[in-house]
Image: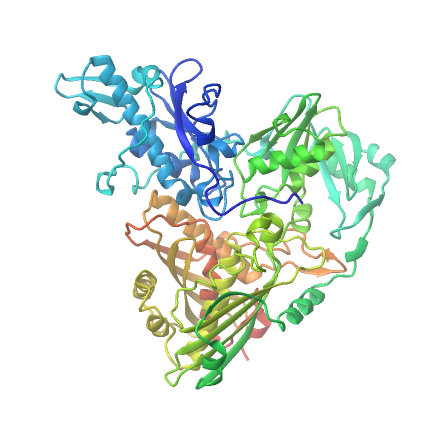
Amino acid sequence: MLARQITPELSRRNFLVAGVAAGGGMMIGWVPTANAGGDKSSPVVPDAYIRIDGQGKVTIVSPMIEMGQGTYTSLPMLVAEELDVDMANVSVAISPPSDKLYGNPALGNIQVTGGSTSIRGFYLPLRKTGAAAREMLIAAAAETWGVDPATLRTEPGFVVDDANKRRLSYGELADRAAKIPVPSEVKLKDASQFRIIGTPAKRLDVSGKVNGSAQYGIDTKVPNMKVATVSASPVFGGKLVSFDEAAAKKIPGVVQVVKLDNALAVVGDHYWAAKKGLEAASPVFDDGPHGNVSNADVVAALANAAERPGAVAKNEGNFATAFSSANEKVEATYEAPFLAHATMEPMNCTVAVTGDGCDIWVGTQIPVWAQQAVAAALKLKTEQVRLHNHLLGGGFGRRLESDGIVQAALIAKQLDFPVKVVWSREEDIQHDMYRPYYYDRISAGLDAQGMPVAWSHRIVGSSIMARWAPPLYKNGIDPDAIDGAADMPYAIENFHVEYVREEPPGIPTAFWRGVGPTHNVYVIESFIDELAAAAKKDPVEYRRALLQKNPRALHVLNRAAELSNWGKPLGPRQGRGVSVQQAFGTYMCQVAEVTVGKDGEVKVDRVYVVLDPGVVVNPNTVVAQMQSGVIFGITAVLWGEITLDKGRVQQTNFDDYRILRIDEAPKIDVEIVKSSADPGGIGEPGTSGLAPAVLNAVYAATGVRLRKTPIDSKRLKAV
């Protein structure tokens, strides 16, 4: 796997440039400061954030990729607000690979969509871009009319001269505005002036998804293209030994068989021919060093690792002294399993290798890194790899990886025609890069009133950052693994958090819709409930006492308790559970109501979500992401688990790796707290707080405390 060089700091300063678009019109975008000023040879950038044509049509190039989270609407709203155009006159385009132009300021200026950072990273930069373009259009109108720019104003799509009762459209001014120097400083609107930000805007990408014109990677069609499917070694690290090429080629429509070190691909005129040909080829693999690995082995190794001290992530006060003298001690071990991403669009990539390089058609969260990975695999220069990005049919972190893209490129290298490589659902689930298996030991000492005076949390699991972005793995600490634990919302005087890195044998791990917080909020909020039970106190009242120094977290807790009628009795084997979190810059409380059947099966009846995400750009998107996150989280807590036997992933498809179905979905109530704080993330928080709310509700309904997910219904059967 290609190691990444990424820094958490902003690695370069960018500045705005403008130019005349091909065919006329205005474009405005970013270039690194190093290429600005005295370097007269630097051309105006060919790609830009804003393009205004002669008819006044505004195209906004989204620096981040759309994978269902609403980025292609929310980011254009930022530009449109300050530019002063109506969203009805705005279209959105997919950005090409370019860290220089589209690097995410929240993630080291790398062009990566993830971590719930799209709005957090671009809230100010895109507003400034829109404001600069607006000032340039005003300046162009002032030049045209020979008046002071200060006497002019804008209204959607026009510059207006009230004194002389005249106006010019942005389209009429675009060419002239492109030649105006970009202002070095711009004045942004006060929030009281917003007419777009904060309003419920309709998604710009909906029509294409409804009428079928939206293009995902799997929809790619290029001339002379064939389709391939692939079978990799069922054991990670295994090698291809043999296959029956003659049998594969007897299948009608099979064109070619391609051998890789650890996989076999069969190419056909269409997917079905390739699939049947692959079955006929009957590839045989050498399992390699991991052929006997089982889940029990993984858990045993994690449990052993949990016995040793880890790297200290945070230490305040003196835990050992406070714990030893505590009135009561509570200790627990929590487990969180491997999880697959199982995106609705399975892994796919189309590649055409030519004499001057290659073209790639794919949906990826990391376009530049994918481009670089293919260049390295094919021994090409980066600029020889032309990546055409698409909408993503789900990402959740899976498409932060380039393994499938590189595999497709290596297959295409052996062919004389373009090939679309499509993984079967079974291949997708059994060769994913999984959410790490975590094994946590947590303990607290309580005072005479049952409140925690000492807290220790030892997190044990693999390090994604050590592989994905090595410079961020420092002093034995994976910053993602401790996210949500070292900075939990509660005030406890003697506080200790540490991390033990323990890698599972051969099993690749990766980000999964908020890895660190999703795991840590589950552990912490479950354990807080245990402490409340030990103290014989109501879970909400217990949290209130611990949140007196955290007003934003306290407010969402109080409001969620009010909305959910906390304390009102429910029916037999029904219960409410609560969780609080501060993660991704967002404060949130979730209350889940569940019914536990006599057979032990859990049904989530209702979920209340109250969140304070700071300034909201599009409330429709926020609500949709909360609903999506809740559904994703329910799927995981009820059924989500990847298990291994003899080195092989046991789950294959949605029959044994279940997802929540429509008739099983709960009613979801979402309330957004009005806030002027900096924007927080929304893509992942809805998932990260769900599991503990459900598990705490199960305890309220049954008195059974579950410390491992997914829920084991056998433990909940009525006696």
Q: Is residue 511 above or below residue 530?
A: above
Residue drawn 64% across the image and 56% down it: 656
Residue drawn 83% across the image and 32% down it: 249
Instruction: Answer left or right for 430 relative to 315.
Output: right
Q: Is residue 277 above or below residue 137?
A: below
Classify the position of the N terminus by image quarter.
top right
- In the rendered image, residue 13, in percent from the top left (x then y), is placed at 43, 36
Q: Which residue ends up furthest to the front in the rendered image? A: 38
| Residue 302 vs residue 699, the one in the foreground | 302
Residue 573 visible to the viewer? no
Instruction: Answer left or right for 624 relative to 349.
Output: left
Q: Which residue ends up furthest to the left in the rendered image? A: 163
Residue 305 image-quadrant placement: bottom right
Residue 6 image-quadrant placement: top right
Instruction: Answer left or right for 541 relative to 708.
Output: left
Residue 562 visible to the viewer? yes
